[in-house]
Image (cartoon, rainbow, N blue to C red):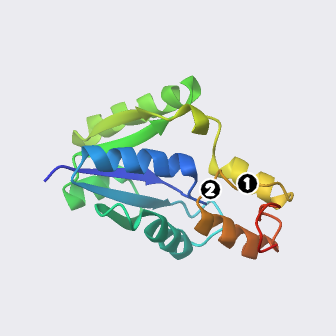
Amino acid sequence: MRRCVCPGSFDPVTNGHLDVIERAGRLYDEVTVAIMINNSKRGMFEVEERAELLREVTEGLGNIVVDSHHGLLVDYCRDHGIPVIVKGLRAVTDFDYELQMAQMNHRLTGVETLFVATSPEHSFLSSSLVKEVATYGGDVSGLVPDAVLRRLATRLGNTAQSTTDPSN
């Protein structure tokens, strides 16, 4: 069975993340979406909330496993027998950082990294940007899955909800 991992903080999961996960799902028999836990960062959503959202928005794909890990990604890969990391690249600046990480990961354990160029419609998208826009009342519909949009609206007092949503 061909297996890979798509790591990230997913705080929150965006349509850009989903694009990479779906594309990895077409290439691999099993894709583990690993929520990487960094105790020095305080997220908008708790890890379990992120996992719930990821399970909900990927349930129709069939070959996705959602998990979380605190520590080195290569240790997770080794412990779970996953030989490939799939990462989305938005711009050259992503490549500079991710290439160094890929080379270090390979040096540490031999795990390979596959880079997937993000679709142009998602090339500007990041969780941080979505959170900032939503926090200030901006419309992030179309940037995140509907389940995430609803959760953001609840968390932020309906400021993230689209003004075109009939439930407003």
Q: On the image, numbered disc 1 is attached to which residue?
A: 140
Amino acid identity at mark 2: Val
Please name whichever residue, 156 or 25, is drawn nearer the observer in this view of the structure: 25
Amino acid identity at mark 1: Val
Q: On the image, numbered disc 2 is attached to which residue?
A: 144
**At x 38% / y 53%, what residue is drawn?**
72
- Helix, strand or loop at disc 2? loop
Side of 94 relative to 22 (left or right)? right
Q: Which picture quadrant has residue 148?
A: bottom right
Side of 148 relative to 75 (left or right)? right
Percent x, y for residue 135?
Answer: 81, 60
Percent x, y for residue 19?
Answer: 47, 46
How crowded pointer 1 is (Cα within 10 Å; few <14, some 14-19, many 20+) is rated as many
Q: Residue furthest front?
A: 166
**The C terminus - image quarter:** bottom right
**At x 54% / y 58%, what residue is drawn?**
10
Side of 86 relative to 163 (left or right)? left
Q: Residue furthest right?
A: 136
- Helix, strand or loop at disc 1? loop
Question: Is any part of residue 43 visible from this angle?
Answer: no
How crowded pointer 2 is (Cα within 10 Å; few <14, some 14-19, many 20+) is rated as many
Please name whichever residue, 142 or 93, is drawn nearer the observer in this view of the structure: 142
Q: Which picture quadrant has residue 111?
A: top left
**The N terminus - image quarter:** bottom left
Residues at discs 1 and 2 in contact (Cβ within 8 Å)? yes
Percent x, y for residue 142?
Answer: 66, 52
